[in-house]
Amino acid sequence: MPVVWLILIVLVLAVLGFIAGRMRVTTAGGARPHSLPNYYGWNVAMKVMVPAFLALVIWLLVQPFVVDGKVTGMIDEAAIPEGSTLGLVMSDVRRVADGLDLAVSRGLMTADSASSIRTESTDVRDLLANAGVALGSNVSPQVLEAAQAYRGMNHTGNLWMTVVVLALALGGLAWAVRETTLEFRARNAVEGGVRILLLAAASIAILTTIGIVLSLIGNTVRFFDLYSVSKFFGSFTWSPSFGGGSELGIWPLLWGTFYISIIALIVAVPIGLFAAVYLSEYASPRMRAWAKPLLEVLAGIPTIVYGLFALLTVGPLLLTVFGRDGLGWMQAGTAVMTAGVVMGIMLIPFVSSLSDDIINAVPQSLRDGSYGLGATHSETIKQVILPAALPGIVGAILLAASRAIGETMIVVMGAGAAARLSLNPFDAMTTVTAKIVSQLTGDADFASPEALVAFALGMTLFVMTLGLNIFALYIVRKYREQYD
């Protein structure tokens, strides 16, 4: 059964359970129920949905790993063509399995024949082409056999998933309706369940972080098995070569990342902070009503548009001033300064909007006390409001810095692709994120260090941003103590 239909069935059972639970106490005579009728309905609905959906999510996450592991064990190393990898063979297996399902759904063959077809009896490639699945070469017997096993395991797993999910939903419905009595504390049960759901929602960030780390660690370890750690962190040259002899030193990429980010923050922080001070302390309500939304429009512009702006407008403009016809410092439009300026423009609404909210959150009593002591408006802003809002402003700057470090499109289109160590802001450079994209673009062999280095770069960037967040949290807590 398709997952969408399964979800709809569970939702229908939950609605029926809500109605049944509510009617069971409203139609019962005698004593007054412990809770309101809606609590009894929600108690039944939650006990229908929560176990069923939890089992569904776990099943959908676990089944692909189990099936892939079993099918991968069926493929011998001798069946892998020369120049190919096990991952590519498994991609063919999945495409063939999907093609067989498509052929069955279109009536080109029966389910039994899809499980028993052999390459000796028919041209499987032509059959799959009629079903709309194009393959680059003929299907080998072992790939077809693995695809049939893959298809069979998935169908069996989906069948058992449907049985288990529906059984849990029906069981929860029967259990909840049976316990619905006038004495049952439905409100306590519902509030306890909601508390657990809120705890699970709050844990998503932690679980996501753990998932990111685990997804990076494995391939990072594989990379360092092939390439020396000392060379990765000790070399100042970035020169990947799939023909061998690669030098994969990370320092030119880190330097480009921080250089561009620093220029972006130099542009964004003063402008954004001054804009926030004006909007919160000086602007009239009418001016604020249209100026702040207009400023925040910058945050909604796609980064590819900023990249085009850097490539077509800012780069040539800077080249006119600092190029050969001007000061002679700039050789091309793609440079650190180009990407930094455009990225700074992109970061202005992050700094201004968050800083404006933080400044407005400063208690009015602090302002009134400053005015009562004879301070002017500007002195109150400098001596009272900004120090009180400093923790939030640091958080806004941190958010802007994290956004700058993780930016890719502006760097690719505005800064160039050269990995070099240079102090000249008018030279072309690149960043860690841009190189991650370039190393994983195309037909990269994931068994080579030139492809696996992308995961090491990602892991390094993750650790550095985590350290930046911890440092910023320390600063925020230190200054916050002065105003508690």
Image: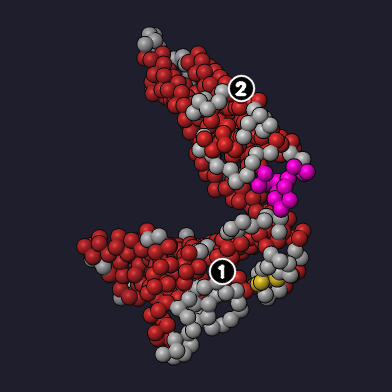
Percent from the top left, x then y, of residue 390?
A: 45, 67
Crowd band around label 2 with a 10 angstrom C-alpha radius: few (<14), some (14–19), many (20+): few
Real-space Cα separation, disc 2 to disc 1, in angstroms:
54 Å
Q: Which residue is mark 1?
A: 431
Q: Is residue 356 visible?
A: no
Residue ID at (42%, 72%): 311
Label annotation for residue 112 = 2
Percent from the top left, x then y, of residue 147?
A: 65, 34
| Left-right relation of 461 to 479 | right
Of residues 154 and 187, the one drawn nearer to the viewer in this rendering: 154
Q: Which numbered disc flags the more N-terminal residue, 2 or 1?
A: 2
Crowd band around label 1 with a 10 angstrom C-alpha radius: few (<14), some (14–19), many (20+): many
Percent from the top left, x then y, of residue 319?
A: 42, 82
Number of marks in the image? 2
The residues colored magenta run 77-89
User: In the figure, residue 223 lies in which quadrant?
Assistant: bottom right
Mark 2 vs mark 1: in front: 2
Of residues 364 and 43, the one drawn nearer to the viewer in this rendering: 43
Q: As displayed, is residue 43 above or below residue 406?
A: above
Percent from the top left, x then y, of residue 109?
A: 55, 25
SS assignment at label 2 = helix
Residue furthest top in the image: 29
Residue furthest left in the image: 286
Of residues 366 and 287, the one drawn nearer to the viewer in this rendering: 287
Q: Is residue 332 visible?
A: yes
Of residues 467 and 228, the one drawn nearer to the viewer in this rendering: 228
SS assignment at label 1 = loop
Q: As displayed, is residue 297 above or below residue 236?
A: above
* Residue 72 within the segment the image draws in magenta: no
* Residue 87 within the segment the image draws in magenta: yes
